[in-house]
Amino acid sequence: MTAIRLLLVDDDPLVRAGLSFMLGGADDIEIVGEAADGAEVEALVDRTRPDVVLMDIRMPAVDGLTATERLRAREDAPQVVVLTTFHADEQVLRALRVGAAGFVLKDTPPAEIIAAVRRVAAGDPVLSPAVTRQLMRHAVGTGPDTRRTRARDRIAVLNDREREVAVAVGRGLANAEIATGLFMSVATVKTHVSRILAKLDLNNRVQIALLAYDAGLLEEREEH
């Protein structure tokens, strides 16, 4: 089995040491580098080629949000998991919007952080439906009034079936649940999700969920 290559980014050396000790003990995870600030991340990614970056948000020079946005704009970008002390924080939301695959709290039990790294490396987001809904509720009123209009303009490129899948993803449903609810195969759901990501130029399912929320599609679904 090929080990998951992991880069740790946190300005606290004690946190980095703890994460390195904890994650390095997993047989399928290899710590390939550490950074104390977002300014160091791109050069380290070029040198170490990680699969996943565990990224602190609050750092003194270049914060984790900026570093995440820069990374996710690159081709063959590694997945990013945000480290935070808050469940619902505007900076967490912004990190998810620019392409982070999810977040873990700094006081999360070691086994759960390891599981999160594995899930992200496999292409799955690290957000439960409950946490996704909490974050989206927190997003109310945090953006400009034009956000819904812009989101609706973007969503307009989807056909009816893709729109239905986007709404289901926004509700936090897994592929199997979407397949059952929309009477299609899991493979077809995956195809639709891939097309939605490509059409909307998004990185992951979390961004689909946030865009569907911004566009008001989840409210429409609840009204019917």
Image (cartoon, helix red, strand yellow):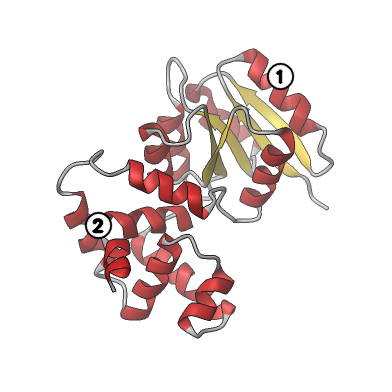
The kind of residue on which mark 2 rests is: Ala
Q: Are marks 1 and 2 in contact (CB under 8 Å)?
A: no
| Image-based side of 12 in relation to 223, left or right | right
Q: Position of residue 28 (x, y in %)?
A: 80, 44
Between 114 and 46, the one nearer to me in the picture: 114
Quadrant of res 202: bottom left
Q: Position of residue 215 (x, y in %)?
A: 25, 59
Quarter of the figure that contains the C terminus:
bottom left
Q: CA distance from mark 1 to mark 2?
A: 41 Å
Return the residue at label 1.
Answer: 17
Q: Is residue 199 above or below residue 50?
A: below
Return the residue at label 2.
Answer: 151
**Element under disc 2:** helix
Q: Is residue 142 above or below residue 222?
A: above
Quadrant of res 34: top right
Q: Residue at x 42, y 16 (%)?
A: 61
The kind of residue on which mark 1 rests is: Ala
**First in sequence: mark 1 vs mark 2:** 1
The answer to whether residue 203 shows anywhere in this view is yes
| Image-based side of 28 in relation to 63, left or right | right
The answer to whether residue 73 shows anywhere in this view is no
